[in-house]
Amino acid sequence: MGTSHSYKCKQCDKNIVASLHETEGMLSKVQAMKCNDCNEVSDCTIATKNSLSGEFNNIIPICECCESQDIVQWDNLCPKCNSAMDDNGLFMLWD
């Protein structure tokens, strides 16, 4: 079961819901990525499960907001002001 946390920046009050580290559901693996084009953070699918073998196959992740491939692993810094964001804990479980 995958998990997403709620993050908030103390400097500019930006809120993000993301996984931060790689997390796995029944059909996919996601990881929080920052887009260099739209400057947003979102959980991007990095692998999908093969229905025949049950193995995960890596895929090229894309930004969930603008579909760009110019993304990098999120470093827990606010994409708006570059300050460290506080983890406010578990926001949701997903599958």
Image (cartoon, rainbow, N blue to C red):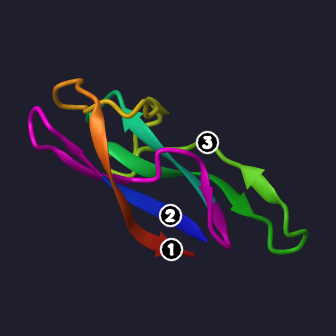
Q: Are marks 2 and 1 in contact (CB under 8 Å)?
A: yes
Question: Residue drawn at (61%, 42%), measured in percent from left and top?
Answer: 60
**CA separation in Å, label 2 and label 3:** 21 Å
**CA separation in Å, label 1 and label 3:** 21 Å
Q: Residue furthest top?
A: 82
Q: How many marks?
A: 3
Q: Residues within 10 Å of mark 2 (few under 14, many from 20)?
A: some
In-front residue for pair 48/10: 10
Tell me the kind of residue under disc 2. Answer: Thr
Question: Sequence-wise, which precedes: disc 2 or disc 3?
Answer: 2
Whether residue 40 is visible here, answered yes or no, is no
Q: Mark 3: which secondary structure? A: loop
Q: Locate residue 39 relative to residue 21 in the image: left or right.
A: left
In-front residue for pair 24/56: 24
Question: Residue drawn at (84%, 62%), measured in percent from left and top?
Answer: 55
Say which residue label 1 marks. 94
Above-or-below relation of 78 to 87:
above
Question: Sequence-wise, which precedes: disc 1 or disc 3?
Answer: 3
Is 25 magenta? The answer is yes
x and y, in percent, of residue 62 in the image = 48, 44
Say which residue label 3 marks. 60
Q: Mark 1: which secondary structure? A: strand
Above-or-below relation of 82 to 46:
above
Q: Which range is magenta?
A: 7-28
Question: Sequence-wise, which precedes: disc 2 or disc 1?
Answer: 2
Is 36 magenta? The answer is no
Nearer the observer: mark 1 or 3; the answer is: 1
Question: Residue drawn at (56%, 66%), measured in percent from left and top?
Answer: 2
Question: Residue drawn at (54%, 45%), measured in percent from left and top?
Answer: 21
Say which residue label 2 marks. 3
